[in-house]
Amino acid sequence: MKVSQRTEYGIRAMISLARHYDDGPSSIKEIATGEGIPGAFLEQIMAELRRGGIVESQRGVNGGYMLSKSPNETSVGTVVEILEGSLSPARCESDCSKMPDCSTRTVLKKIEESITKTLDNIYLDELLKVGVHEE
Amino acid sequence: MKVSQRTEYGIRAMISLARHYDDGPSSIKEIATGEGIPGAFLEQIMAELRRGGIVESQRGVNGGYMLSKSPNETSVGTVVEILEGSLSPARCESDCSKMPDCSTRTVLKKIEESITKTLDNIYLDELLKVGVHEE
DNA sequence: TTTAAATCCGACTAAATTAGTAAGGTATTA
DNA sequence: TAATACCTTACTAATTTAGTCGGATTTAAA
Ligand code: FES
Ligand code: FES
C-alpha cells in the first residue's frame, strides 16, 4: 500500500509547478535540481502527466512544463490517479471473472471511495499555503 | 497503492475464520482449499497474524487457527496493519531526516488518516452479513 | 542560418520486492 | 507411537520499480 517513488516525485514536481505558476514554464532541469529528483526519471514522469492532460509542455529554448489549469483547480487526486493508474487498491478489475466471490472486494471498494474522496478535495494551492513541509 | 496478494489472502482467510467462528479451529489445509490459496504461502501469513495477536493457534491433531476475539471485535484495519506493516502510504518514517521538507508529507498523512478511519470501522461480521461477494 | 536548449521517445539495465516453494522441526492427540 | 498440523528458516523465480542512455525533434535566440 505504499505509494511509489515515481508518484511521490510526481506530486513534488506538481507542487513545484504550482509554486511557480506565474513565472512561465519550468524546465525538467530546474524542477529536478530544485526537488532533488533524477532528471531522466522525472522526464518520464512529466511526459505521463502531460499525456494525462494536467500539464502542458513547451519545447525548445526557454521551454518547459506548466500546469494546464490553475493550482486551485488541480487536485492531488488527479495527479495520483494518472501516475498510479487508478486510485483503487484492488489487484483486479471490477468485473473480476477469475474470482467472482472474492470477499475482500467490499473492503477494497470502501478503501477506494475513502481515498478518492480525500484526494479529490486536496488542491495544489492548499499545499502551498500550509508551507512546503510538515505543517 | 495496490494491496499485496499476501494481504488479500490474509483478509480472505480472516473472513473464513469469522464464518466458522463457532466450529472450532480451522486448519491451514481447510482454509487454503476453501479459499483457493497456496497452502505453504498461507502458512506464513497465518503465522504473521498470530504474532500480531489477532488469531490463536492450536497445534497437533485437530488443531488449526481461530480468531482471538469475536468477529464483531476484529477490524479489517488491524488485519491490514499487521500484514502491510502499517496503514501509511508514505515511503519514509515519520521523522524523515533525509528529506525534511518533503511536500507530499501532508498529502500522505491525510491519506493515512482516511484509510485508518475507514478500515478501523469495518469489522469481520459486517463482511459476513453482506454476503461473501460483491453486495 | 546555425546553434543551443529543451522536450520527446523507446529500449535497456539493475535493484528491490513479491509470490511462492521446500524441507525439516515441534507440539498434540488419538 | 503414528498421524496431524503448526512452526521456522531458507531459498528461488517472477514481477515490478527505479533509474539510465542514446538519439530524434522542436523552438528560440544569437
Ligand atoms: S479477486 Fe478481485 S478483489 Fe480479490
Ligand atoms: S520524503 Fe518523507 S514523505 Fe516524501
Image (cartoon, coloured by chain):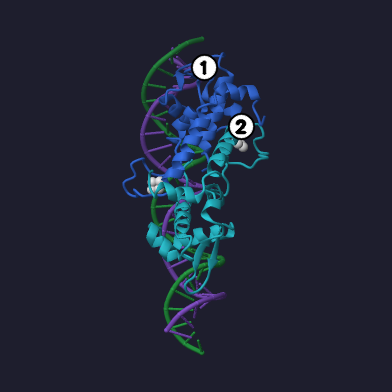
Chain colours: A cyan, B blue, C green, D purple
Mark 2 vs ligand 1: CB below 8 Å: no
B121 or B39: which is nearer to us? B121
Q: Count numbered badges in the picture.
A: 2
Looking at the figure, which quarter contains the C terminus of chain B? top right
Q: Mark on residue A7?
A: none
Residue farthest along the left direction in this orientation: B97
Q: Is residue A32 placed above or below A87 in the rendered structure?
A: below
Looking at the image, residue B90 sits to the left or right of residue B26; the answer is left
Residue B129 appears anywhere in the view: yes
Question: Tag 2's secondary structure?
Answer: helix
In the rendered image, residue B125, in percent from the top left (x then y), is placed at 58, 21
How many angstroms separate mark 1 from mark 2 (CA)? Answer: 20 Å
Task: Identify residue type, mark 1.
Answer: Ser
Reading the image, the residue beneath label 1 is B70
Q: Residues within 10 Å of mark 1 (few under 14, many from 20)?
A: some
Which residue occupies 51% across, 54% down? Answer: A71
Residue shown at the point (42%, 23%) measured from the top left: B53
Q: Is residue A89 visible?
A: no
- Residue D22 in picture, x, y percent from top left: 46, 72
Residue A106's disc number: 2
Residue type, numbered disc 2:
Thr
Report helix, strand or loop for mark 1.
loop
